[in-house]
Image (cartoon, rainbow, N blue to C red):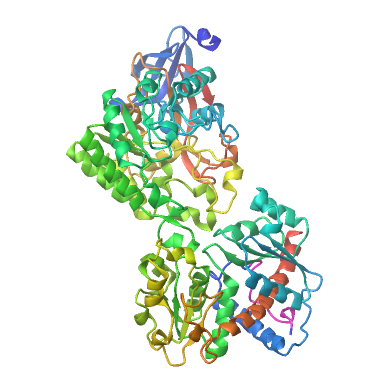
C-alpha cells in the first residue's frame, strides 16, 4: 500500500521538529514505518516511491550513523542520493547558509536532509529552498527522526506508548534528542521524567511538560523505559560536572541503578555510547533488556516513512506554488 | 559653511502648534520664532495661523505638537570603520526622520574613540553634514579592552561628552572603581553596559522557558542584576557619576530605585524594545529581535514600564545598532545583536502615552530634557537663546513601520511590520528644516 492510495493526514511540507505535530500524524508515520520495518527485515523490495527523486544529505556536523541511515532509507525507496558534508563543501570558505540554499536550489533536489550545529538553522534553510526539508538534528533544538525511531522501538516492545513511564537521563540541557522525545512521548500519552544533575537540567525545563528528577534512583523508580543520553567529554571536566568518575557514580546506568526501574524496563540509547561514562557495558549489551540495536534498525524504517510523506506533500505544494 | 551664512538672520515663525516644552511643563496653543540658528521667542502669541508676524517665513503647524528635538543617548553610527552597515549620513537621515536632533555616538567604531582625533573626526563630519548633531562618547579604556584607562580628560576637552566602553561592559571591578574615581577629577559621567560578560558569554537570548524550547543558550537576568548592583556600590564608594544604558530586568531596576532613594548619583535609560516587546518576539528564530541585552519576559517588560512611570528610569534611548543582511540572515546563534531604532524612537515611546501608562508630557521628558540633563547638553528644551532644534509631530497619525522604507542603511528593525501611532512631520536643526514628511 502506498501513501498515495490512502488519505494522508500528515500534510506538512517539511519535518522540522516534533513540537506542533498531532498525535495522529505521529501515529501515521509510525504505522507506515512499521510496514517498512517488516519489509526490511525480510529483505523485500518495496515500492520505489522516490524513484527519479533527488535526496541531498547536507551535514554541517559530522555524523556517520544518521547520515548512513538516511542514505539507506532514501536508496531503499529508489532515490538518487547525494551526500554533502562540510569538509567537502565551501561552507568553511565563508559561504553562508543562505548562499548554500540558493546553490542547492539550482540542482532541483526534492528533499534536503539537513544537520546543523545551530538551533533553528534548518528552519532558516527551509524558508529559502523549493524542496522538502527533513531535520536531521539542529543544535540543541530538535532531532525529530530520532524521537520517531525511539517511539517505534518502544511501541514494538511495549505494545503502546500511552501510559508508560519513561525516564530520559543525562545531558538533557544540550540534547535535541531529549527535547524531541519529550514532545513526542507526552503527545502520545506517556509520562516523561527528565533525570540529570542540576547543572544539566535547569528547573525551567519543566516547561517541556516533563517531571524533573535530580536523583537518578528516585527518577528510575518504576519506569518502563530508561533512555540514556550521550554525555560529551568536554562537559565533564569542570564546566558542568566535576569529573567523569563522579558522574558515573551518581548517574551511570549499571545493574544496581537499573534495579530501581521495573523488571522488564527497556534500555535505550541514541548512540554513540560512552561505555563506562553514562552506561555500563554489561547493561548496554544485555540482549534481553537493551533495545539499542533495534533503535538503529528502526531508524531506517522511520526515515523511509518520513521521506515518503514529505515527498508526497511536496508535489502538491509545487503544484500550488508553481515551482 | 555656506548653508549657515544663508540663514544667518532668517526669521521663521512656527505657528498654530500645540507647543510643548517638557522641561518647563509647558503645553499650550502657540508657536516658536527662530532667528538664524536660535530660538528668539515662543509662546501663545504664535497661536494663530494667519496672525501678523512681520518680516518672517511662517510655517503653519496645523495644530500638531511642536517640541524640542529629541536627544538620543545611545547610537551606534558604524562610521568610521563599518560604513557598509551605516554612515554618519544614513544615521543622520534616520535620526531626523524620527525627530532626533542630538545623538550620542558609542565609541565602538574602527578605530575606537579612545583618541582625540576620532572625537574630532566624528564631530567635524557631522557638522559638515548638517543633519542631526552628533556628540561622541569617549572610551573609558584604551581599545575598549577593559584594562587601561583612556585619556578621559583630554578626550573631554576635545568634545567627548561622557565615557563608556559602548557595547562592552567594564568587567573588572578594579578598573571600574578607578574609572569612576578618575572621572570625578573632571566631573565626567561614566556610562556602563550592565552585563557581566562571563554570565552572558555564548548566550543568544533571555534565559528561561522559551530558550529551553528553542534550544538556544540563555543569558540570565542575573548577568545584568549583579553588574548593576556592583556598580551602584562602586559609585557610592567613589562618589563618581554613573549612568546605566538599556536596562531590561525587573531586579536591576529595583536596585536603582533603592540606590536613588539613598541619594546615590546614578541614572539610567532603557530602549523601546524593552517596554514594547518581550522574548516571544524571537520565536521562529527571528534574528531582527536578537538584541543586547536580550528581550526579557513579560514581567520584566512590565517592570520597565513601572520604572519609567515612577521615574527610576530617567530616559529612553534608541539603542540604534545597524547590522547588515550578512550579519542577520544567519542561524540565530551566529547572528549579530542589535536593531536600528532612531526612526522609531518617538513612535514607540508614544505607545506609553497611547496605552495610558504616562501623560504625553512625562513621555516626552524621557526623550528630550531628561537625557540632555544626564549628559549636561544644552539641548532638549524650548527657551529663548536655545538652539532652534525642533520636532513637529502628530501624536495620532497612524503608520506601519516597514523596515525596507526606513532611511537607515541597515534594515534590521525589531519593529518591522508594527503598527505605530504618532509620526514626525518635520525636523528642524539649527533653524533649518532637515526633514519633512
Of residues A174 and B433, the one drawn nearer to the viewer in this rendering:
A174
Residue A229 in the image, given as x and y percentages of width and height: 49, 74
Does any portion of residue A74 appear in the rendered image?
Answer: yes
Counting from the top left corner in percent of width and height, residue A53 is at 78, 69
Residue A236's quadrant in the figure?
bottom left
- Between residues B315 and B82, which one lies in front from this camera angle? B82
Q: Is residue B396 visible?
A: no
A323 sits left or right of A174 in the view: right
Name the residue at 54% across, 69% down: A20
Tell me where residue A39 sits by quadrant: bottom right
Specify whether A104 is left or right of B115: right
Residue B82: give x, y in percent of width and height. Answer: 56, 33
Image position of A41 with respect to A318: above or below: below
Q: Is residue A8 magenta?
A: yes
Magenta segment, principal secondary structure? loop
Q: Residue at x 47, y 53 (%)?
A: B204
- Please, which residue is most extreme toward the right here? A52
Q: Quadrant of residue B30?
A: top left
The structure residue drawn at horizontal position 78% and vertical position 85%, both measured from the top left corner, is A45
Tell me if residue A10 is in the magenta stretch.
yes
Taking B122 as reference, is A222 above or below it? Answer: below
Q: Nearer the viewer, residue A249 or A66?
A: A249
Report the magenta residues as a range: A2-14
Please give the name of the residue rendered at 46% of the width and 53% of the height, measured from the top-left corner: B202
Amino acid at each position: 500500500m502506498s501513501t498515495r492510495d490512502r488519505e494522508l493526514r500528515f500534510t506538512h511540507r517539511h519535518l522540522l521538529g516534533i513540537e506542533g505535530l498531532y498525535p495522529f500524524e505521529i501515529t501515521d508515520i509510525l504505522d507506515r514505518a512499521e510496514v517498512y520495518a517488516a519489509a526490511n527485515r525480510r529483505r523485500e523490495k518495496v515500492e520505489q516511491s522516490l524513484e527519479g527523486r533527488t535526496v541531498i544529505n547536507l551535514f554541517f556536523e559530522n555524523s556517520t550513523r544518521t547520515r548512513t541511515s538516511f542514505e539507506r532509507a532514501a536508496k531503499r525507496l529508489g532515490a538518487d542520493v547525494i551526500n554533502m558534508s562540510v569538509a567537502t563543501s565551501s561552507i568553511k570558505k565563508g559561504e553562508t547558509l543562505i548562499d548554500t540554499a540558493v546553490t542547492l536550489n539550482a540542482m532541483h533536489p526534492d528533499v534536503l536532509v539537513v544537520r546543523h550545529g545551530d538551533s533553528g538553522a534548518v528552519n532558516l534553510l527551509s524558508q529559502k529552498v523549493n524542496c522538502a526539508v527533513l531535520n536531521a538534528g539542529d543544535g540543541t533544538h530538535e532531532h525529530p527522526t530520532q524521537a520517531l525511531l525511539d517511539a517505534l522501538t518502544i511501541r514494538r516492545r511495549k505494545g503502546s506508548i500511552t501510559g508508560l513511564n519513561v525516564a530520559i537521563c543525562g545531558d538533557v540541557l544540550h540534547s535535541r534528542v531529549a527535547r524531541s522525545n519529550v514532545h513526542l512521548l507526552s503527545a502520545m500519552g506517556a509520562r516523561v521524567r527528565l533525570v540529570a544533575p542540576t547543572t544539566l537540567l535547569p528547573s525551567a525545563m519543566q516547561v517541556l511538560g516533563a517531571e524533573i528528577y535530580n536523583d537518578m534512583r528516585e527518577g528510575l523508580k518504576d519506569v518502563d523505559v530508561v533512555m540514556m543520553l550521550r554525555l560529551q567529554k568536554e562537559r565533564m571536566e569542570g564546566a558542568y560536572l566535576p569529573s567523569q568518575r563522579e558522574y558515573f557514580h551518581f548517574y551511570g546506568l549499571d545493574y544496581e541503578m537499573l534495579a530501581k526501574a521495573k523488571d522488564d524496563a527497556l534500555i535505550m540509547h541514541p548512540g554513540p555510547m560512552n561505555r563506562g561514562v553514562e552506561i555500563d557495558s554489561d547493561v548496554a549489551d544485555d540482549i534481553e533488556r537493551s533495545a539499542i540495536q533495534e533503535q538503529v534498525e528502526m531508524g531506517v524504517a522511520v526515515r523511509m516513512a518520513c521521506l515518503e510523506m514529505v515527498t508526497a506533500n511536496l508535489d502538491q505544494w509545487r503544484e500550488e506554488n508553481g515551482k | 559653511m555656506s548653508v549657515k551664512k544663508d540663514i544667518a538672520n532668517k526669521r521663521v515663525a512656527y505657528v498654530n502648534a500645540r507647543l510643548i516644552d517638557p522641561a518647563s511643563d509647558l503645553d499650550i496653543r502657540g508657536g516658536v520664532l527662530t532667528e538664524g540658528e536660535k530660538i528668539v521667542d515662543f509662546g501663545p502669541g504664535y497661536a494663530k495661523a494667519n496672525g501678523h508676524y512681520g518680516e518672517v517665513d511662517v510655517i503653519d503647524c496645523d495644530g500638531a505638537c511642536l517640541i524640542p528635538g529629541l536627544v538620543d543617548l545611545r547610537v551606534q553610527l558604524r562610521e568610521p570603520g563599518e560604513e557598509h552597515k551605516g554612515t554618519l549620513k544614513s544615521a543622520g537621515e534616520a535620526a531626523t526622520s524620527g525627530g532626533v536632533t542630538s545623538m550620542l555616538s558609542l565609541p565602538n567604531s574602527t578605530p575606537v574613540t579612545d583618541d582625540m582625533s576620532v572625537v574630532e573626526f566624528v564631530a567635524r563630519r557631522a557638522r559638515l553634514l548638517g543633519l542631526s548633531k552628533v556628540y561622541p562618547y569617549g572610551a573609558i579604556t584604551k581599545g575598549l579592552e577593559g584594562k587601561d584607562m583612556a585619556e578621559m580628560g583630554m578626550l573631554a576637552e576635545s568634545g567627548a561628552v561622557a565615557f563608556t566602553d559602548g557595547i562592552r561592559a567594564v568587567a573588572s571591578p578594579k578598573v571600574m572603581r578607578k574609572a569612576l574615581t578618575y572621572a570625578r577629577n573632571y566631573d565626567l559621567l561614566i556610562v556602563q553596559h550592565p552585563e557581566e560578560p562571563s554570565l552572558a558569554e555564548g548566550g543568544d537570548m533571555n534565559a528561561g522557558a522559551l530558550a529551553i524550547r528553542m534550544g538556544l543558550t540563555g543569558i540570565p537576568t542575573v548577568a545584568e542584576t549583579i553588574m548593576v548592583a556592583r556598580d551602584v556600590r562602586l559609585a557610592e564608594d567613589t562618589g563618581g557619576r554613573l549612568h546605566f544604558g538599556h536596562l531590561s530586568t525587573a531586579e536591576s531596576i529595583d536596585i536603582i530605585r533603592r540606590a536613588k532613594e539613598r541619594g546615590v548619583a546614578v541614572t539610567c535609560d532603557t530602549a523601546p524594545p524593552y517596554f514594547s516587546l518581550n522574548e516571544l518576539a524571537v520565536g521562529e528564530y527571528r534574528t531582527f529581535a536578537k538584541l543586547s541585552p536580550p528581550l526579557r519576559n513579560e514581567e520584566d517588560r512590565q517592570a520597565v514600564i513601572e520604572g519609567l512611570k515612577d521615574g527610576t528610569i530617567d530616559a529612553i534611548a534608541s539603542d540604534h545598532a545597524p547590522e547588515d543582511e550578512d550579519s542577520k540572515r544567519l542561524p540565530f546563534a551566529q547572528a549579530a545583536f542589535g536593531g536600528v531604532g532612531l526612526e522609531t524612537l518617538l513612535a514607540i515611546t508614544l505607545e506609553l502615552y497611547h496605552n495610558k501608562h504616562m501623560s504625553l508630557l512625562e513621555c516626552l521628558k524621557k526623550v528630550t530634557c531628561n537625557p540632555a540633563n544626564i549628559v549636561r547638553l544644552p539641548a532638549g528644551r524650548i527657551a529663548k537663546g536655545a538652539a532652534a532644534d525642533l520636532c513637529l509631530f502628530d501624536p495620532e497619525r497612524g503608520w506601519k513601520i516597514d523596515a525596507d522604507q526606513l532611511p537607515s542603511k541597515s534594515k534590521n528593525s525589531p519593529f518591522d511590520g508594527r503598527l505605530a501611532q504618532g509620526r514626525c512631520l518635520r525636523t528642524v536643526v539649527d533653524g533649518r528644516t532637515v526633514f519633512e514628511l
